Image (spheres, helix red, strand yellow):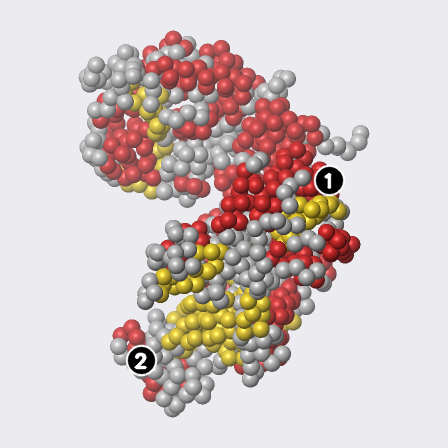
């Protein structure tokens, strides 16, 4: 059989038209591959993906799912190629016609049918709140945008509750979205389903407009990034870690409980760090909590590692030895930290999985920054709490 | 009633492709006072010029309009045509329908319409033009060269050899520049000092060169042919007229400063000469590291000096220099790679930049020419990383041009001086130059390993403490490489001098996107600038190797000579003048003029303009509230008429 290949420029053109215009700028220096956290542990080669895209070569579909959109390569690329846009466009062009991996089919199917990735009943989106917290209305200042993952995933519901309690404690006027909203669609877009993403986005925007939303708090950096970069509307959007840092600085939240010198390290979620440029706020919060001994991992801030959960990774199966979250847990353990803090429900899910499979759950705890703040405020969400809501 | 001839050039298809030239000529013929209108394929050609000459005679034309390329290209050509036909050269109008019309549109309708509008305006203005007489000024025969690197040295020597007096201004205490830091030069591997020091010495000995070291230009006044430049002579604290260069002072000095010459790799004395072949061979005191200046006592150098040359009281002084032309050869800086944290420069002792490595190779350098790491050991494995901060949109987009070649030179010298394995991490190998490809082949045969992929990260080795690991993709195999090495050499971007913008401002130059000095034309006037009489040579214009730098230095010297070889020169007549009867004395003109041409006569209570300084930019005329300032060739009437013509469309 002939080994010769012929460039198929119509395909390359289709990728560019789907938003991957930047691929023509690439000069194949390999900085992306050299920077990519997947390179040392998998066969995924991001440079090659771009090269196949430039020439429209067959076989691209076999390795287009390796990227978790951590943005490390984009920041380092000497040509300024928006590599994530290229990846998204390639997935968009090729994922039609049954090319979607099995694990992503249920993800996309649930998004399409139920508006969330967790096959949750849309009417039960706010069930976690047990009607304790107010719904958003135009007279309130902040919309607390609850990510689907904190609404439906039992582990991450704690983030939703913690956030709600801290918001009450701080005396701000806020409310939850009605059950009419759906997923922000960030991961769906990265998986390449641009059409469905547009549908979800426009439904959310309709809800925001009809309720007069102006300020949004997100607990997931993925929603944050999506609203900021993909929704194209002028809302004031804050990640909750930023708001907590601000409230602490203004004296409106004062952590009380002393943790007694327990060592904590912090993992920068890609979508809060590199994608949104928020590095200091979560660190400021951790450092303000009494008795937390804060240590950095070797790779932090702009050079942070990825957990592997972005770009649809959360819904894809990875073999042992090919999981970034496992490596990150090992890095965290090497610092001697007893708590690995982060501020993203995807990272929480990935790390909780890893500590279990690595049998490290007795050595290190995975906590969201909001959970630690809640604990330091001495509010217990595991017991019935007094209704402090201002309704 | 004037008699105007309009000549429309096709410029081959350059203009004719997007402007209907014959239609433009037909249109011109309908305009007031236009007696003849023609189009022609190449108006600048000899037949084109002859056509204009004949029509001037035949139709008794007294105004000529040429619609063609930018006046920067052919204004002089057509002015000569007018002069040869007995017309005053200022009765020519050029309408730029190439750079401003045909080259900036694909639409022939739009192109033709815009050309018509511009031509209409030009006809209206042309009718009001008056003959002007050029000014003739005396030319100062001397030249200043700023920067004492190889470019400045070569330019100074060339000019001095023609008998012209040259002032060579160097901010360091010695001339020589970066080339004096190198050990070998590519591709011939000749010893840098061996070919440079004879030239440095020739500068020192030359009767026509005044070498001004530890000097900086602080003010520039005047104009082409007559620059008046203030030079700050920085205090050396050593009277060089008394010093006999015995260097007894440096032996006694207890002070320790960082050797700038050795790229901070070692310490030097507080009273010092930077390197053994420095010119002049006379020391200066570095105030920052001098014990006396820091603590108020010491003076050991003063005691050691039999010539009584030490002078702690010395102050900066200012020297006035008058010259006819200036050559800037201010060189480059190496990019600071510390902010590129992924490469670990400044964090890991095993990571070096290119200039540091040049000093390691040099027998007069910090290690006496031995390649040893900071801990004194010899590296066994070395990685050279190309394109660090160059060809990089996050840092400097340009290619620094010499890094491929000097990196190959490094590989050769590493092989010669150590038994190390040497690896290159590169994107593209750029070896375009005489003997360069051959040099690349030679290095390949020396068994240097080439990895085609940009170095992505330098980290500390987890397995072997003290060693480094270079991470990169070998894009040829698609494999991720983790290479343990003892030494990493970064080949960083070559960038403009930190003070290049200040120099540009002093001499009224533009800088390009990267901050290098902008040439007048990238191909046809690469050594001239938009400031008449100011020329540039070497890396201050853009990164280049020594052969190109030297060639530019010769060229800049020739350019400067074309000015100072003349006793007198003609200047444009298009200057501004003040009508004292209507001047209200507001001094707006004094405030806006970038050349300092207007001044206020307090006695007469009016502004006056020094025509020798005026460049005819018209700023003063535009801010004059009483229309007392007349910008010759661009009078209010002429400009308003042109605008009227434009606005009819």
Residue B226 visible (yes or no): yes
The alpha-carbon separation of the residues under discs 2 and 1 comes to: 76 Å
**Label 1: which residue?**
B22
Circles 2 and 1: CB atoms closer than 8 Å: no
Q: Which element carries disc 2, helix, strand or loop?
A: loop
Q: Earlier in the sequence, mark 2 or mark 1?
A: 1
**Quick check: B369 above or below B44?**
below
Q: Residue at x 33, y 62 (%)?
A: B605
| Left-right relation of B81 to B180 | right
**Viewer-nearest residue: A365 or A361:** A365
| Left-right relation of A327 to B519 | left
Residue B535, image x, y percentages: 56, 65
Residue B11, image x, y percentages: 72, 47
**Viewer-nearest residue: B570 or B385:** B570
Residue farthest to the bottom, as pictured: B306
**Quick check: B438 above or below A214?**
below
Q: Residue at x 41, y 88 (%)?
A: B242
Residue A247, image x, y percentages: 24, 32
Quadrant in the rendering for residue B57 = bottom right
Residue B554, image x, y percentages: 63, 70
Q: Are marks 2 and 1 on the same chain?
A: yes
Classed neighbour count for the residue bearing mark 1: other residues with Cα under 10 Å, few (<14), some (14–19), many (≥20): some
Residue farthest to the right, as pictured: A1
Residue farthest to the front, as pictured: B1
Q: Which mark is residue A302?
A: none
Chain name for mark 2: B
**Label 2: which residue?**
B313
Q: Residue at x 49, y 36 (%)?
A: A71
Q: Residue at x 45, y 85 (%)?
A: B245
Quadrant (top left, top right, bottom left, bottom right) of the C terminus of chain B: top right
Chain name for mark 1: B
Mark toward the viewer: 2 or 1: 1
């Amino acid at each position: 059989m002939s080994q010769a290949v012929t460039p198929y420029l119509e395909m390359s053109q289709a990728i560019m038209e789907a938003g991957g215009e930047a691929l023509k700028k690439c000069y194949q220096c390999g900085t992306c591959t050299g920077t990519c956290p997947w390179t040392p542990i998998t066969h995924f080669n991001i440079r090659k993906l771009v090269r196949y895209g430039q020439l429209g070569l067959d076989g691209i579909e076999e390795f287009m799912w390796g990227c978790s959109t951590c943005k490390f390569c984009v920041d380092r690329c000497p040509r300024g190629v928006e590599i994530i846009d290229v990846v998204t466009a390639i997935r968009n062009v090729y994922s039609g016609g049954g090319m979607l991996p099995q694990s992503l089919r249920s993800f996309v199917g649930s998004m399409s049918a139920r508006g969330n990735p967790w096959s949750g009943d849309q009417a039960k989106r706010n069930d976690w709140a047990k009607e304790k917290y107010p719904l958003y209305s135009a007279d309130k200042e902040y919309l607390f945008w609850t990510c689907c993952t904190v609404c439906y995933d039992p582990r991450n519901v704690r983030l939703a509750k913690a956030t709600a309690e801290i918001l009450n404690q701080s005396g701000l006027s806020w409310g939850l979205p009605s059950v009419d909203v759906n997923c922000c669609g960030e991961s769906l877009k990265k998986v390449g389903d641009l059409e469905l993403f547009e549908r979800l986005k426009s439904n959310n925007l309709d809800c925001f407009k009809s309720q007069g939303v102006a300020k949004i708090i997100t607990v997931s950096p993925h929603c944050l990034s999506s609203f900021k970069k993909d929704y194209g509307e002028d809302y004031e959007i804050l990640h909750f870690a930023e708001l907590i840092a601000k409230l602490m600085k203004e004296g409106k939240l004062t952590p009380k409980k002393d943790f007694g010198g327990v060592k904590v390290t912090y993992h920068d979620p890609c979508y809060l760090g590199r994608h949104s440029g928020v590095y200091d706020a979560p660190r400021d919060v951790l450092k303000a909590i009494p008795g937390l001994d804060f240590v950095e991992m070797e790779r932090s801030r702009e050079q942070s590692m990825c957990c592997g959960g972005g770009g649809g990774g959360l819904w894809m199966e990875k073999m042992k030895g090919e999981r970034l979250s496992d490596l990150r847990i090992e890095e965290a353990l090497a610092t001697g930290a007893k708590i690995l803090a982060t501020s993203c429900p995807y990272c929480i899910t990935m790390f909780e999985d890893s500590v279990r499979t690595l049998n490290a759950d007795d050595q290190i705890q995975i906590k969201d920054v909001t959970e630690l703040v809640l604990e330091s405020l001495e509010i217990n969400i595991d017991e019935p709490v007094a209704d402090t809501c201002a309704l | 009633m004037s008699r105007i001839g309009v000549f429309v050039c096709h410029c081959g298809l350059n203009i004719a492709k997007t402007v209907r030239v014959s239609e433009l000529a037909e249109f011109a013929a309908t305009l007031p006072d236009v007696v003849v209108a023609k189009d022609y394929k190449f108006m600048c050609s000899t037949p084109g010029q002859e056509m204009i000459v004949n029509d001037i005679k035949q139709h008794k034309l007294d105004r000529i309009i040429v619609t063609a390329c930018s006046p920067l290209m052919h204004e002089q050509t057509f002015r000569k045509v007018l002069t040869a036909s007995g017309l005053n050269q200022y009765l020519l109008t050029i309408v730029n329908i190439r750079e401003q019309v045909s080259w900036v549109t694909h639409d022939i309708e739009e192109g033709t319409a815009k050309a018509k509008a511009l031509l209409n305006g030009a006809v209206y203005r042309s009718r009001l033009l008056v003959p002007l007489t050029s000014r003739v000024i005396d030319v100062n025969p001397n030249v200043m060269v700023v920067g004492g690197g190889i470019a400045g040295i070569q330019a100074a020597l060339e000019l001095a050899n023609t008998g012209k007096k040259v002032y060579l201004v160097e901010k360091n205490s010695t001339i020589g520049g970066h080339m004096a830091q190198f050990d070998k030069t590519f591709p011939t591997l000749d010893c840098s000092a061996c070919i440079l020091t004879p030239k440095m010495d020739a500068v020192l000995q030359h009767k026509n060169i005044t070498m001004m070291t530890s000097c900086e230009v602080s003010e520039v006044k005047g104009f082409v042919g007559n620059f008046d430049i203030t030079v700050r002579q920085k205090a050396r604290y050593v009277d060089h007229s008394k010093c006999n260069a015995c260097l007894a002072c440096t032996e006694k000095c207890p002070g320790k400063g960082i050797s700038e010459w050795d790229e901070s790799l070692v310490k030097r004395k507080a009273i010092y000469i930077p390197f053994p072949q420095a010119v002049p061979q006379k020391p200066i005191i570095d105030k920052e590291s001098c014990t006396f200046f820091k603590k108020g006592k010491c003076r050991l150098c003063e005691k050691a000096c039999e010539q009584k040359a030490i002078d702690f009281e010395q102050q900066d002084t200012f020297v006035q220099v008058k010259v006819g032309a200036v050559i800037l050869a201010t060189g480059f800086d190496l990019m600071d790679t510390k902010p590129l944290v992924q490469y670990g420069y400044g964090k890991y002792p095993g990571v070096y930049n290119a200039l540091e490595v040049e000093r390691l190779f040099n027998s007069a350098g910090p290690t006496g020419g031995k390649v040893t790491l900071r801990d004194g050991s010899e590296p066994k494995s070395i990685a050279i990383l190309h394109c660090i901060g160059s060809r990089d949109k996050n840092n400097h987009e340009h290619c620094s041009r010499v890094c491929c070649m000097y990196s190959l030179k490094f590989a050769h010298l590493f092989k010669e001086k150590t038994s190390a394995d040497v690896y290159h991490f590169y994107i593209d190998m750029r070896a375009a130059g005489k003997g360069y490809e051959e040099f690349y082949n030679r290095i390949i045969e020396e068994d240097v390993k080439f990895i085609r992929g940009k170095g992505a990260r330098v980290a500390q080795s987890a397995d072997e403490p003290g060693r480094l690991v270079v991470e990169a993709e070998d894009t040829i195999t698609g494999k991720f490489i983790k290479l343990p090495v003892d030494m990493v050499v970064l080949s960083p971007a070559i960038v403009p001098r930190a003070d290049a913008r200040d120099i540009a401002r002093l001499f009224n130059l533009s800088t390009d996107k990267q901050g290098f000095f902008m040439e007048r034309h990238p191909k046809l006037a690469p050594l001239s600038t938009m400031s008449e009489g100011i020329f540039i040579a070497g890396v201050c214009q853009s990164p280049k190797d020594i052969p190109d730098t030297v060639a530019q230095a010769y060229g800049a010297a020739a350019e400067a000579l074309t000015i100072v070889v003349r006793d007198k020169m003609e200047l444009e007549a298009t200057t501004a003048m003040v009508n004292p009867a209507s001047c209200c004395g507001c001094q707006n003109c004094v405030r806006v003029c970038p050349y300092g041409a207007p001044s206020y006569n307090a006695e007469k209570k009016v502004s006056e303009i020094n025509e020798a300084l005026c460049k005819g930019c018209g700023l003063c005329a535009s801010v004059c509230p009483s229309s007392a300032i007349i910008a010759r060739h661009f009078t209010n009437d002429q400009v308003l008429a042109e605008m009227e013509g434009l606005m009819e469309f």
